Amino acid sequence: MITLCFDFGNTRLKAGVFTNDSFLEEISFDNDSIESISAAVEKYNPDKTILASVVHHNPEIENFLASKTHFHKLTSESKINFKIAAGKPETIGTDRLALMAAACAEFPGKNNLIIGIGTCITYNFINSQSQFLGGAISPGMEMRFKAMHDYTAKLPLVSLDKNLPLIGYDTKTNLQSGVIFGITNEINGFIEKYEEKFGNFNAVLTGGDAPYFASQLKNKIFADIYFLYKGLYALSELNHQHA
């Protein structure tokens, strides 16, 4: 049985493909046209689909998926496998809901800090009683690079160089060092603060650059770039059971 888990974020439109409970692969979309989504549906012939979107996507997609599959749109009204202790649960992004669902599915009965590196960096803490307590949000890597370019007169727009030196030797490498080592130290700092408050917990780093940053961290951390999809799959199963 095939399930397509659509994740529409600020940077990329993508989906995870599951065969029964096993993650198969990730697919990306150039746009949110019916043609793009239809091509994926025709290729995989899914029985179930779920959509988590933090952007203003083409609303016709929802009707299309509902007509072709058992479809669920993830919202604040969806059934979830955890409790929300944070205020205003209706304002929590569906990406963060999916990350918490993955934490409960992968590490039940544990304290978990899930760090998602995307357009923004989100810190999401769920305790051993499956209560999502909240966390923090800070600018992501590309946002930091772009902000320094957009809000200055002469600083160039640069991007990640995985071989950058600690001490920058020109403007480009100074900007890269500031962003990359700034993010690394930020993550280490958050983990240390959570350790002071909660003791032992699982720390999971996810997002496309998770393996790179995980290798830079001094703390023991899991890197899983497909973690969010695992949460979407768990929520798809839960909501289709109660449909």
Image: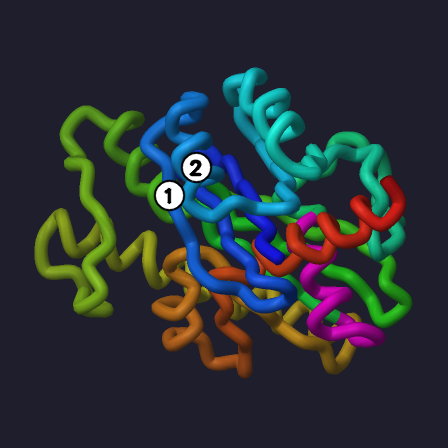
Task: Check the image and report above or below for 67 versus 23.
Answer: above
Q: Mark 2: which amino acid?
A: Leu
Residue at position x 38%, y 76% from top? Answer: 215
- Spatial CA span between label 1 and label 2: 6 Å
Circle 1: element type: strand
Q: Mark 1: which amino acid?
A: Ser
Residue denoted by label 2: 13
Left or right relative to 120: residue 36: left
Residue at position x 51%, y 54% from top? Answer: 17
Q: Is residue 186 visible?
A: no
* 187 or 78: nearer the viewer: 78
Q: Which residue range is magenta in the image?
A: 98-111
Task: Check the image and report above or below for 172 versus 92.
Answer: below
Secondary structure character of the magenta stretch overall: helix
Q: Quadrant of residue 92?
A: top right
Residue denoted by label 1: 28
Residue at position x 62%, y 57% from top? Answer: 1
Crowd band around label 2 with a 10 angstrom C-alpha radius: few (<14), some (14–19), many (20+): some
Task: Check the image and report above or below for 122 versus 56.
Answer: below
